[in-house]
Structures are given as C-alpha cells and as structure tokens.
C-alpha cells in the first residue's frame, strides 16, 4: 500500500480576530480625540 | 450588501469626518484578509491578535491626526502597516529570543539539572541504605562476591583469584546474590527507584 506522507494542512476558515479585539479597537477609536492647537496636535484618550 | 457599495475611500473620509460607524464597516470588511496575512507570517494566534490590534491602532491614530492621504488604496496601506509590524515583531524576538513551550517539543525535556535537590538527596540516601541492609541479609559467600564486583569494581577473574573459587562459581554466586536480593525486595515491597 502506498502511503502518502504529505500532510493535508488543516483548513483554517476561522482566521479572523476575536470580537474583543474588534470592540477594543472601536472603543479606542471613540475614545481617542486629536486636539489641534496651532500647528501642534495633541492626542487625548477620553475614557 | 448595500454597505459593500460604499467605497473604502468614502468610508475613510466619513470616518475622518467623525462617523465612527465607518471604521467598524472598514474593519469588518477587511479583518479576515489582514488577519490571515499576519497569521501566514507569524503562525501564532496570540501574536497575530496583537499585531492586528496594533495595526488598527496605528490606522486610527493616523486617520484621526489627518495624516492619511488617499494616494493609494486603503487596504494596501493597512497591509503595509501590518507587514512593518510583523517585521518589528521578528526583530524584537531576534534581540530577545524566548523559549516557546507551546509546541510538542520542549527543550526542558532534554536539559535537566543534574544536581540533586533536597528531596532527591534524601531519597538517594534512603535507597542506598536499603540496598546495604538487603546485602547484609545475603549468605556470606554471595555477599563477598557482590561487594567485590559492585563496590570494589573487581573483575570475576580477580574475584575468583581472591576467593579461591573458579570463575564459574563466582559468577554463580553473583547470580544467586542478585536473585536473592530481588526476592527480598519483592517480599518486602521495597521501592528502590528515585
């Protein structure tokens, strides 16, 4: 019997980030505000 | 499906103008490609998650600071950021190599601390004193051969010369000594392993 040694790589269909990561990013985006003052830019995280 | 009709560039400009929902659509639209891209480079879920997050933090900051210019397309730009962060990740790991114990092979299964700790020292002493007591139980001729062979490291030829018996007799006594010791160990349920 011929043996096939090459591995079939497991299909990774769920290659996507966790929901927590997404929600963290969206919250981060909402919290971050950039304040312009003359030519300076200040970042403020308002949580 | 109507969301798909809105171009990335339109969503980006909506986001810059304060529409937070546009970012959520952009992430939702591209998360799988970006995540797979990072994963294909680092092959680690946790690291991928970290780099994915850092990528979008960079995206958000750049967009909010108004430094993004719509020269290229949104997705290639994000991919480029992800790519650079992957390179940073490997650079950092090269400077600070760490043991990865998640795989099947662990370096610590090969390396071990050869010096005995307190517990093992006690066990070793116990085992050695048990063995000495069992040897004391042996008949004199067997005990003599065994002590010469194991503790004085003499050959059977030397033993036969010293005790004045043939080599075969010395071998036989050694054999019976071991058989008798095993018998005593079995009878008394003595455990002589570390």
Image (cartoon, grey):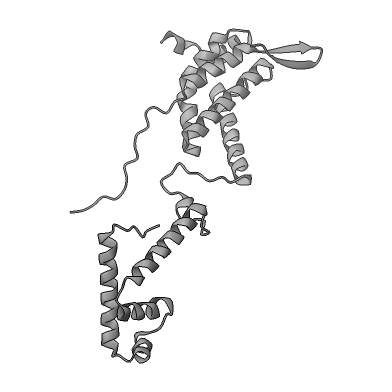
Seen as rendered, the residue at the extreme left is A1
> Is A23 positioned to the left or the right of B136 in the image?
right
- Along the line of sight, the residue nearer the viewer: B40 or B129: B129
| Displayed quadrant of residue A31 | top right
Rendered location of residue B114, percent (x, y): 51, 59
What is the count of numbered marks?
0
Rendered location of residue B147, percent (x, y): 38, 77
| Displayed quadrant of residue B127 | bottom left
The residue at the point 30 percent across, 78 percent down is: B142
| Residue B170 appears in the picture as rendered | yes
Quick one: quadrant of the C terminus of chain B? bottom left
Q: Is residue B4 above or below residue B80?
A: above
Q: Is residue B24 above or below residue A6?
A: above
| Displayed quadrant of residue B160 | bottom left
Rendered location of residue B15, percent (x, y): 59, 11
- Along the line of sight, the residue nearer the viewer: B161 or A43: B161
Quick one: quadrant of the N terminus of chain B? top left
| Residue B69 appears in the picture as rendered | no
The residue at the point 42 percent across, 80 percent down is: B153
> Is A43 positioned to the left or the right of A20 in the image?
right
The residue at the point 21 percent across, 53 percent down is: A2
Q: Is residue B142 above or below residue B44?
A: below
């Amino acid at each position: 019997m011929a043996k096939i040694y090459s591995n079939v790589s497991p299909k990774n269909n769920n290659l996507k980030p966790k929901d927590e990561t997404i929600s963290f990013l969206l919250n981060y985006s909402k919290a971050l505000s950039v304040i312009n003052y003359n030519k300076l830019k200040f970042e403020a995280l308002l949580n | 499906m109507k969301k798909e009709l809105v171009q990335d560039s339109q969503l980006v400009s909506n986001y810059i103008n304060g529409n937070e929902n546009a970012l959520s659509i952009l992430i939702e639209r591209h998360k799988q490609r970006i995540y797979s891209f990072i994963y294909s480079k680092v092959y680690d879920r946790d690291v991928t998650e970290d780099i994915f997050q850092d990528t979008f933090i960079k995206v958000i900051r750049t967009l909010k600071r108004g430094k993004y210019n719509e020269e290229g397309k949104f997705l290639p730009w994000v991919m480029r950021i992800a790519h650079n962060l992957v390179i940073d990740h490997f650079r950092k790991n090269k400077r600070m190599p760490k043991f990865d114990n998640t795989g099947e092979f662990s370096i610590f299964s090969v390396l071990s601390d050869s010096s005995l700790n307190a517990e093992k020292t006690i066990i070793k002493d116990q085992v050695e004193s048990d063995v000495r007591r069992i040897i004391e139980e042996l008949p004199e001729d067997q005990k003599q051969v065994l002590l010469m062979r194991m503790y004085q490291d003499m050959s059977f030829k030397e033993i036969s010369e010293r005790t004045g018996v043939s080599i075969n007799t010395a071998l036989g006594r050694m054999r019976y000594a071991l058989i008798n010791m095993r018998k005593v160990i079995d009878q008394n349920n003595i455990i002589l392993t570390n």
